[in-house]
Amino acid sequence: QVQLVESGGGLQQPGGSLRLSCTASGSIFSTYTMGWYRQAPGKQRELVATITTGGSTNYAGFVKGRVTISRDNAKNTVYLQMNSLEPEDTAVYYCNAHSPGWVVVPIIYWGQGTQVTVSS
């Protein structure tokens, strides 16, 4: 059974930083693309960033320059470093694992989410 467990959310002031972590159980981490999504109240879930097994990254336009995604394959953990936080970054952040492209029917796992609140 695959589980994604997020941590690191909380309350931060505008301009501050947070680092989110997501640890995956099971044997998927070495072959799956990992990502972070977020969902603000009343809005749809949206992509924040992804990182492939080879370390290639992709970022949503609204976070470029402020966010860094990384992964530690030895620890089965993906990180999201967020700097220069803005109130608009307030959302529940979800960890995501996506099966490789050669899997005919994609397999996607989600974590339970961690709340990030940016407020003074």
Image (cartoon, rainbow, N blue to C red):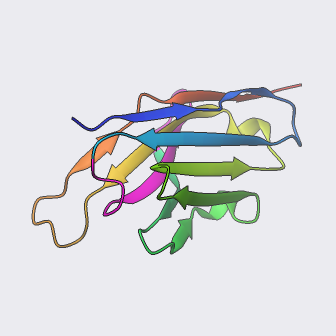
| 36 lies left or right of 109 | right
Spot occupied by residue 52 in the image (x, y as percentages of width and height):
43, 68
**Residue 107 lies within the magenta run:** no
Spot occupied by residue 50 in the image (x, y as percentages of width and height):
49, 61
Quarter location, residue 12: top right
The residue that appears at 72% across and 39% down in the rendered structure is: 88
State how many labels appear.
0
Q: Which of 15 and 95 is in front in this view?
A: 95
Q: Is residue 2 above or below residue 66?
A: above
Q: Nearer the viewer, residue 113 or 32?
A: 32
| 74 lies left or right of 64 | left
Q: In which quarter of the image is the N terminus?
A: top left
Q: Nearer the viewer, residue 53 or 63?
A: 53
Spot occupied by residue 61 in the image (x, y as percentages of width and height):
63, 64
Q: In this view, does 113 lie above or below 82?
A: above
Is the magenta region chiefly helix, strand or loop?
loop
Q: Is residue 22 above or below residue 116?
A: below
The residue that appears at 59% across and 50% down in the rendered structure is: 79
| 47 lies left or right of 91 | left
Magenta-colored span: 27-45
The residue that appears at 49% across and 64% down in the rendered structure is: 51
Q: Quadrant of the C terminus?
A: top right
Spot occupied by residue 107 in the image (x, y as percentages of width and height):
20, 52
